[in-house]
Image (cartoon, grey):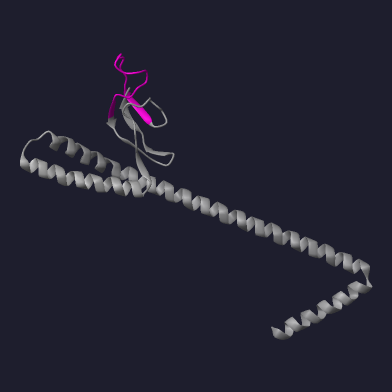
Amino acid sequence: DRVELENQEQEGELNTEESLQNPETAKEETDDYAKLNDQYMRLAAEYDNFRKRSNKEKEAIYGSALCDVCRSWLPVLDNIDRAIAALEQLESKESKQMLEGIEMIRKQAKETMQQLGVEEIVSLGQSFDPVYHEAIAHIVDDKYGENEIFDVVKKGYKKGDQVIRHSQVCV
């Protein structure tokens, strides 16, 4: 390899000496150099675009997978909320202790969701927004404003701007 490299260097010197003597050869070499440089620059740009596109796809796949997993856990959170609501109706000492334990579980679950960037969609008292809400009932009542949400049947969740589950609301 070393001998071959030295031979190429010597040939390069000879080509340089020839190109100094022959202007046509110099122009051809300059054109060849420009073509090779252009190919190199295009290849480098193409690779950079590929790398950026791959990173975006990887992030999108991660976000999608995270939302799928969180969507699977939402019924568990709903059941924890139902258990809390049921225990709040009871008056015994044991039910209060159970309520305390389940509330701690709920708190831990909420913190975990927040760490993942998932947040609950605030709906009660808000104006109906079809991007975040799914209306399951509609009433006409002077106590509430037009399109005001007065009850949340099922909580909705989102990660950033992506809705994981719409809030089911009464408007």
**Span of residues in magenta:** 133-152
For residue 150, side relative to residue 4 (left or right)? left
The quarter of the displayed image where residue 94 is located:
top left
Vertical relation: 142 (above or below) 109: above
Asked whether 162 or 54 is in front, the reply is 162
The image shows residue 137 at horizontal and vertical percentages of: 30, 22
Q: For the N terminus, give its image quadrant.
A: bottom right
Which residue is pictured at 12% across the width and 33% down the height? 89
Asked whether 119 or 51 is in front, the reply is 119
**How many badges with numbers are in the image?**
0
Q: For the C terminus, give its image quadrant.
A: top left
Which residue is pictured at 45% across the width and 50% down the height? 61
- Outermost residue toward the bottom? 3
Which residue is pictured at 17% across the width and 35% down the height? 85
Is 162 included in the stretch rendered in magenta?
A: no
Vertical relation: 27 (above or below) 142: below
For residue 136, side relative to residue 99 (left or right)? right
The image shows residue 23 at horizontal and vertical percentages of: 93, 68
The image shows residue 87 at horizontal and vertical percentages of: 13, 37
For residue 70, side relative to residue 4 (left or right)? left
For residue 125, side relative to residue 40 (left or right)? left
